[in-house]
Image (cartoon, coloured by chain):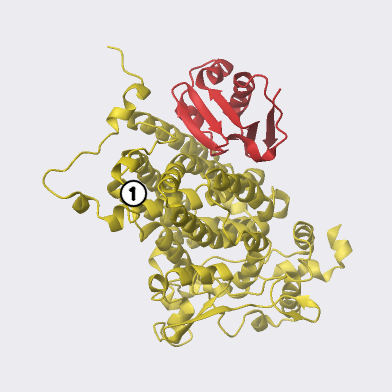
Chain colours: A red, B yellow
Amino acid sequence: MTTADDAGNLVGPVMRAGEIADAVLEAIQEDNEGREVLTEAHASYLRIKVADECFVRFETVGDVLGRTVTRGDIESNMPSFAGFIRTEPDGIRFVAR
Amino acid sequence: MALLEMHEWYDLARDTNWTPGYVAEDEIFPPELSDPFGISVEQWETFDEPYKVCYRDYVETQRDKDIGAYSVKSALARADFFKKASPHWKALLALHFSPIGFAEFHSASAFARMTRFSRAPGMRNMATFGTLDEMRHGQIQMYFAYEFIKQDRVFDWAHKSSKTENWIIISLRHALDDVEHTRDAISAAIMTNFAFEQCFTNLQFIGLSADAAKAGDHTFATMLQSIQTDEARHAQIGTPLIQIMIENGRKAEAQQLVDVGFWRIWKQFSALSGISMDYYTPLEFREHSLKEFMHEWVVDQFGRNIKALGLDLPWYWDYFLHDIETFHHCQQIGIYVYRATQWWRPIACTSPAERDWLEEKYPGWNDTYGKCWDVVADNIREGRFERTVPVVPPLICNMCGLEVTGVAGVGRQVDGRTWNATNFHLDHEGRRYHFCSEPCKWVFELEPARYQGHRSIIDRVLDGTVPPGPDGFYEYMGQSFEERGVCGYDYQWIDGYDMPRAAAAE
């Protein structure tokens, strides 16, 4: 199991607190199986952190919510992220470099 | 007929470079506006957008964002909220909306220049959406601010401020002109999209939204985060540019752009976010201190990105870490004592309980900045209100345009303490320039010809640009008598000082 003990390589989305944030967290736990997913809750936002690389698949978020989820749905609720972003056809990837 | 997925046509659709037949390449893309670094167009064409979006998706997403933000505003009918808000929150809203709304609208022109002059098709695509983003940010913030005009004319400054020569606006304009508006497309993008938007906007638009949510101002909190979702996308323009610069032997130039842009914008956010988070946010609603938010968003998150890209932390990083804990405390004192030069109603925010919080977050605050507030409080208690306003104008930094102040821990030692105003001055072509810090002086020394023509508000007083007479200064800054700041609490903030500290804390 990959552990997130190196804070310098933690990457992932910062989500506006709410239903989408909770769904993205659940999806990330599923899409990054075997890897530790850390969270940091603030009054209005949720930091989701995975070491080195973090992937969130739109379909997985949609499965959690029970409806179709697009890139725009994630973007509308993601004011920031740690690391570098790569938009892909089926999801969003966050990488440390 | 089945539609192609975006990734199937995106690369072809955004490949809009071609070989001109009627004019020379340099006439379409003048090097001074497109690329002063001499990197080949083939290299710029390798620009790979980290965040790919097409127009159809963009419009749908932006429509949904606006529906979300405006719906919250309508549902919560803010008029009552504002009437009941404390002078703390009213000052915070005024400080945010007044300088930022129109500055964001101006940013649209910076993105439009990136769209027009970049030689990288992918960058032009991203910058097009960035242009639309910034127009939205200007409009939504002015619209939300104008809701309050019936209650408080201060909010007229959401539109008016950028048309004035108020000293705070001069300071902000000088920084944004330098970073966004007076450079080639590549330099402006590295400074704006990377050094500015990948770090400092997080502070004001996410950090402050946490405070707003705790304060129950869900309209403001939602608006801030809605804006930042755009920033998170278009701020990615800077990353591939830096990679291309480094791959083509221009690391030193990229580093300098980051170092200058980062410092210039930090000074603005130090005052804006620093005062908002550590003073104007009511004590019970503070999520974190400026220092804590800075470490989360800038020192850790952005600092890692700098190094991951192959750049170095700016040479002044240690000084910067110290500045995080000091500069805004000095500016808060200046903003309060020179309150008539602000258009809103500044507040002190140094009640005994607030002082305890500041001491906890910034150990040593009471022995340094607190001593200044003791003098102000004593003068108010004794009814010597005239002594709470300095009779001489402050020394203003010829780079950041903010007050040259004492910084705890820096300067000569007097009476066992190190806390003195330090003027980092420079003599250049027959005149002396004053700076608040070594980095501000360094920026000037890099390109004296670029900066030497700018005159601070104090320069304008001394050279006669500002009309003489008791009202000349304020009229020059666009402030009628009613638009001159007064203490937001009518001096009642010192009430807690009449009780023993321990009793007040209880």
Q: How many marks?
A: 1
The disc numbered 1 marks a residue on which chain? Answer: B
Which residue is the site of mark 1? B39
Q: Within the image, what quadrant is residue A17 found in?
A: top right
Say above or below: B361 vs A17. Answer: below
Q: Secondary structure at mark 1?
A: loop
Q: Image check: A28 left or right of B39?
A: right
Q: Is residue B472 visible?
A: no
Q: Tell me where residue B319 appears, x and y as whole percent.
A: 64, 63
Q: Image check: B28 left or right of B460?
A: left
- Out of B505 and B313, give the one closest to the viewer: B313
Say above or below: A79 vs B147. Answer: above
| Kind of residue at disc 1 | Ile
Q: Image check: B249 left or right of B119?
A: right
Q: Quadrant of the N terminus of chain B?
A: top left
Which residue does the image show at 48% across and 34% down from the upper left?
B68
Q: Residue furthest left?
A: B22
Q: Within the image, what quadrant is residue A14 found in?
A: top right
Q: Tell me where residue B205 appears, x and y as whole percent.
A: 55, 47
